[in-house]
Each structure stands twice: as C-alpha cells, then as structure tokens.
Amino acid sequence: MEVRGLTKRFGDLTAVDDVTFDLFPGEILGILGPNGAGKTTLIQLLLHVLTPTAGRIYVFGLDLDRHREAILSRVNFSSAYVSMPSSLTVRENLQVFARLYQVSPAPERIAHLLKLLEIDDLAAKITGTLSSGQITRLCLAKALLNEPRILFLDEPTASLDPDIADKTRRLLRRLRDETGMAVVYTSHNMKEMEELCDRLLFLSKGRVLASGTPTALRDRFRGGTLEEVYLKVVRGEA
C-alpha cells in the first residue's frame, strides 16, 4: 500500500492531515496516538468507507478510488467495537460473510477458522448470547475468511483475557510468516504494540509525528519503553 498526502476535513476540523506512508508485504504496521488523533478516520479512509479530501491511496498497485471492489475483495477488517448480527448463530454469521466474500469451499474454511480461534464449541450458539471476548474472536474469524492480503485490526485484543490475547498475537505473527499477509494494527496497549509491530506511526491531531521500528523510536526519543516514548511524543516533550 502507498498512501500519499492523505487528508480528510470535516468542515473546519482536519481529522487526517497530509499523511504519507507505505505498507510492505508481510509487515505489521502499528498506528499509535491519543483519542482523537485520527486513527479511526485514517482506517476508514484506507477501507474507502470515507472519501479523502485530498491525497491518493494505492493498494496492490491500484488506485483505491478507481478499483475499490477489486481491492476490498482482498482485504478485511476487525474491531473490538464492531458487533455481528445478534440473532444468528456463530456458524450462520460466518456463512453469510463467506457468501459475501465468495469463499469456497465455505464449510471447510469456517470449520478451520473456528478451530483456529478456539471457538468451535460455540458454532451453534446464538451470537447475541456470547461474551465480548467471544464476539471479538468471531469478528477475527470473519476477518480471516477471505484470506486477506491486508488485514486491518482496530484494538482487536481489547476485550480478550491475557491468555487469549497472547494466543491471538501469536496467531497473527504465524499467519504473517506463513502467508505474507500485511497487518495495520491499532491499540493503546504499548507492550503489545512493541512486541507485535515491525514499524510504528505516531499520530497526533491527524499528522504523523514520528515513525520507525520500536527499537529505533526508543533510541531516538531516549525512552526505556515504548510507553515512555509515546508519552513524550503526544505531550510534545520529544
């Protein structure tokens, strides 16, 4: 993915301000920033949910504005804050999305993902009866249905207990290593971001304030931990 001069304004508010970066195959790119920094708006632009005020986005060498359907068939998204149709069972929800993504053979793919995310025992349960952590894992299963080349994850472990969160991070790294899938990842868990991400973008007021590997950023801003670096950057002390 190539993002060039991406800007989004809502009236007098500039939510994303001249953002430029690349995403490479097999890379896990973390997007950091305080609430209101523009993280969610940026992801919505990258998914073409919002139309940019200025700038261009190229994915797989194609202009997202002109090749939206072809590009989005090869990406997916999951968030801890997005629910699924509550009256369907877990399996029925995945069957609906498998049809939308034209996944074939769907039953085998669904069974594989349910087992992979350790929710195969929930297949017949009504989604509305699931815990928040179970719904999070269902959303992750949905996001992996079409074997995406780029996966967008918005705080995917926020509602998971430490054991399942650790298993989820390990799974993401394994899928990245095995398939070359790239991941765009947001979280307020600094330890998680430091452990998982190959490279980080710090956003504040819609602009990229700093970028680099976790190690390079710690060295640059003389922080013992990523959390120390984060606090220096967002407070303007760097």
Image (spheres, grey):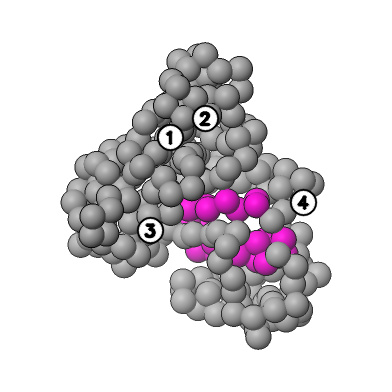
Q: Amino acid at mark 3?
A: Gln
Could you tell me residue 206's position as x and y percent? 34, 44
- Residue neighbourhood size for the residue with mark 4, other residues' Cα within 10 Å, grouped as few (<14), some (14–19), many (≥20): few
- Where is mark 2, residue-wise? 230
Q: Is residue 68 above or below residue 199?
A: below
The boundaries of the magenta stretch are 133-158
Name the residue rendered at 47%, 40% in the picture: 33
Is 80 in front, or is 107? 80
Observer-nearest of 140 and 155:
155
Mark 2 and mark 1 residues within 8 Å of each other at the beta carbon: yes
C-alpha distance separating marks 3 and 2 = 23 Å
**Quarter where residue 118 is shown:** bottom right
Look at the numbered disc 2 and give the secondary structure of its residue.
Answer: helix
Lower position in the chain sequence, tag 3 or tag 2: 3
User: Residue drawn at (60%, 53%), measured in percent from left and top?
Assistant: 156
Q: Tell me the quadrant of the picture where the C terminus can be found.
A: top left
3D distance between C-alphas at marks 2 and 4: 24 Å
Residue that badge 3 annotates:
44
Q: Position of residue 103 (x, y in %)?
A: 51, 71
Dot label at residue 161: 4
Taking the image as shown, residue 38 lies to the left or right of residue 164, namely left
Q: Earlier in the sequence, mark 1 or mark 4?
A: 4
